[in-house]
Amino acid sequence: MIQTTDDIIATINSDVEGVTSLMLKDLIKNHRMDEGRRRKALWERYTLTDVPIYHRKQTSYTKVDRKIANDFYADIVDTKQGYMGNEVTISVNREEYKTGGELNESEYDKDRLHLRDFQRKTSSEDQNSEMVGMAASTGLGYRLLYVPTGKNEVKTMNLFPWEVIHIFDESLDEAVVAIRYYTVTSTDTSRKTKEITKVEWYDKTDITYYIDDGEYNFHIDTTKGIEGSQPHLFDGVPIIPFPNNGLLTAEPEKVTDLIDAYDAIMSSTTSEIEQLRLAYMFLKGAGLAVDDQFMHNLEQTGIFPLDENGEVGFVNKELSDGPVNNLLAEIRKNIYQFAKSIDMSKDFGGDMRVIGWQVTLLNLENSCKITERKFSKALREQYRMLSVYWQKYQGVQIDPYNIEFTFVRNFPRDLKDEVETLMLLLGTVSRETAYSQMSFIDDAEAEIKKIEMGNDPFREVVDGDERPTDQPPSDK
């Protein structure tokens, strides 16, 4: 069943249940066998649930066959998540609240606090960090915006990419439909269980719910209402893609063959060592007399009863580990280099300067910058839909283009050197220019404002926010 975007929209609008069922069957089966399967396989590599070395066929059941999976994949992903996803902060731009050079502080504080409360309620920082890991491990992540039943608030949920089908307008590069599907176990009256698929069909205005009978025969899920449909209350499709890069590839995806080669060599070498002892004794002239009684007498006397031409010795098994270690070291180096990551097991030296770290982390930083741009675009779309909802249902007007996203790297800093540089700059250039050169100051103007507020005796801290008061600070 060949389907373009126009075909899909026309089918769902036709409201013919049989045709819609065939379309959903076609879309979901193809996705499960193609892109969905690929992304789930990458996730299983990340979790070490299923990797190729586990499926290596044993040449002989009588021989030792170790299957060792070295967790490079997760190490590369976790390194990026810890480095880039350390903290993703969302704030409003102070400059946009100035009129004639004067800050409209009440409007700025109102929008800032609303944004802060939303992030705290939705655990935004944690979800953004988890999204970095999901995108890095599978190449793509999705986030769902939804309004809980009976509440006037927005929640967010990260979705697995193998459970989402995103359909774009081919001419506008704009999402027109998103399908979320997942399986649940159902038990019938005869206590037989089967896997059924549930579908949530999102267009630009509504959600429509479908369910199958376990055989891909879909119908409207009437448990969600007679027509199985309801408005989702957002201005657009509320499932937003968060790609890792433009190719939608996972961070270690290019080096999976190298990881598999490392696993194979390690497994084979370990099996070889374990299969045979490194040395075997031989007895020349003992004939077939080596039995239990022979071994008992040997333990008691320590004497080998051999004839005059007899000899006792050992057969040593020589293992040349040099070539194996060299090969493993080269593969390991290539894994981290081609994955644009860093091997933290290496000894970088305790006195390594920040400039040395900057060079070492250059590949990882370049990869993070690409992901940062993709995430900024996705977050911009998320907050565009949120701002429309807030304005329509909560009376809060926040311009989404005034919202800024800051990805704080977990980067080693030479604070002593930076402070010394700051002291040299102050008095030579403006304070804003001097502060902007410091890695630990994200917003130079905001920092100046904090310093000025710190010199104001008529301010006190309330719930973590500095606010002006009409009275001097209390003694509490």
Image (cartoon, rainbow, N blue to C red):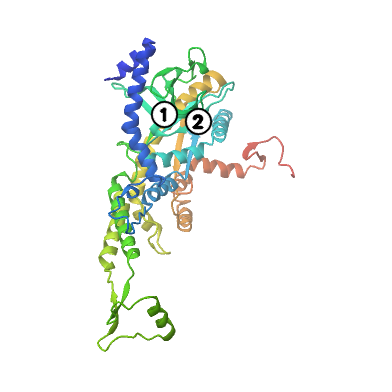
Q: Residue 79: x percent and y percent? A: 41, 49
Residue at the disc numbered 2: 156
Q: Residue 165: x percent and y percent? A: 37, 27
Q: Nearer the viewer, residue 161 or 77?
A: 161
- Give the alpha-carbon distance from disc 1 to disc 2, as whole Å: 11 Å
Looking at marks 1 and 2 on the same chain, the residue that comes earlier in the sequence is marked by: 2
Where is 326 relative to 289, above or below?
above
Residue 323 position by quadrant: bottom left
Can residue 377 be seen at all in this image of the molecule?
no
Find numbered disc 2 in the image and state the secondary structure of the residue it sits on. strand
Q: Amino acid at mark 1?
A: Ile
Residue found at x 43% / y 23% = 199
Where is 338 relative to 208, above or below?
below
Where is 85 relative to 102, above or below?
below
Residue 172 position by quadrant: top left
Q: Residue 314: x percent and y percent? A: 30, 78
Residue at the disc numbered 1: 240
Q: Are marks 1 and 2 in contact (CB under 8 Å)?
A: no
**Residue sitting farthest toward the bottom:** 308
Assess disc 2: are there few (<14), some (14-19) or many (≥20) residues with their C-alpha within 10 Å of its C-alpha: some
Find numbered disc 1 in the image and state the secondary structure of the residue it sits on. strand
Q: Quadrant of the C terminus?
A: top right
